[in-house]
Amino acid sequence: QQQVKQSPQSLIVQKGGIPIINCAYENTAFDYFPWYQQFPGKGPALLIAIRPDVSEKKEGRFTISFNKSAKQFSLHIMDSQPGDSATYFCAASIGGAQKLVFGQGTRLTINP
Amino acid sequence: DTGVSQDPRHKITKRGQNVTFRCDPISEHNRLYWYRQTLGQGPEFLTYFQNEAQLEKSRLLSDRFSAERPKGSFSTLEIQRTEQGDSAMYLCASSPRDTSYGYTFGSGTRLTVV
């Protein structure tokens, strides 16, 4: 009930491509769904977050798509750049940004 | 105040020793969280404070682990009688009272138990 399942584990995309990372959850009480980006040796940094009352949110080159009925959400990165190469984590929580349950992470590589 | 500060960045200790980590949150944030992250995995929740009150503890936080936030500012996480399985990155994060804003994580303390 508390798990968030993330796929794929790793992803390689050419520069300019649109990597898509998917997450699925079971607990319908979750009401906050953030995505974090983590570089080696650093803590995760918040990229973008969505609430279940909207189906899509864009911030710059990052877009979250949310499907409440399927209990799935995904991250799209437009015009990907080598600097976007990092590990991405989805997460979910109840009551806003409180205790977060993280997915297992996706190691993204953008080739030049 | 530019972010969440954690000290030390790295700690190598012998099995059985006690270790203590410190976290200084963003000054206006009243919520503080500790997470543990092992290699290739997402962070796992350990505990969180609102001001000086510890509001929730994970089952991951065995009796060898204790966290404090004595004056509602910085926090410490102590691990007693360390085991090799405690080797991980320990992450601290803080957030304001308004939970519509996300966390800010520190860079973590990497613990290696030998």
Image: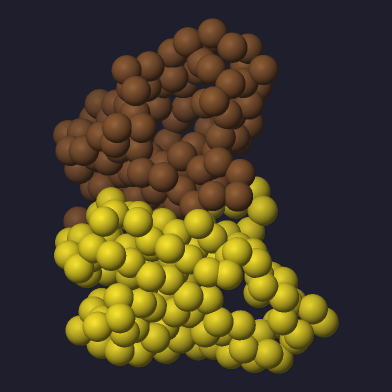
Give percent across and percent down for residue B70. Answer: 25, 26
Instruction: Name the colour scheme.
Output: by chain
Quarter of the C terminus of chain B within the rendering: top right
Q: Quadrant of residue A17?
A: bottom right
Chain A: what color? yellow
Q: Residue at x 43, y 36 (%)?
A: B23
Horizontal side of A16 relative to A104 (left or right) equals right
Horizontal side of A43 relative to B92 (left or right) equals right
Vertical comparison of A70 with B78: above or below: below
Q: Residue at x 55, y 82 (%)?
A: A20
Horizontal side of A104 relative to A78 (left or right) equals left
Vertical comparison of A92 with B109: above or below: below
Horizontal side of B39 relative to B104 (left or right) equals right
Q: Residue at x 38, y 78 (%)?
A: A73
Give percent across and percent down for residue B39. Answer: 61, 44
Give percent across and percent down for residue A92. Answer: 32, 63
Give percent across and percent down for residue B101. Answer: 29, 66
Vertical comparison of A109 with B104: above or below: below
Looking at the image, can residue B23 be seen?
A: yes
Q: Residue at x 34, y 83 (%)?
A: A66
Foreground pick, B30 / A37: A37
Looking at the image, can residue A37 be seen?
A: no
Chain B: what color? brown
| Tally of marks | 0
| Residue furthest to the right | A112
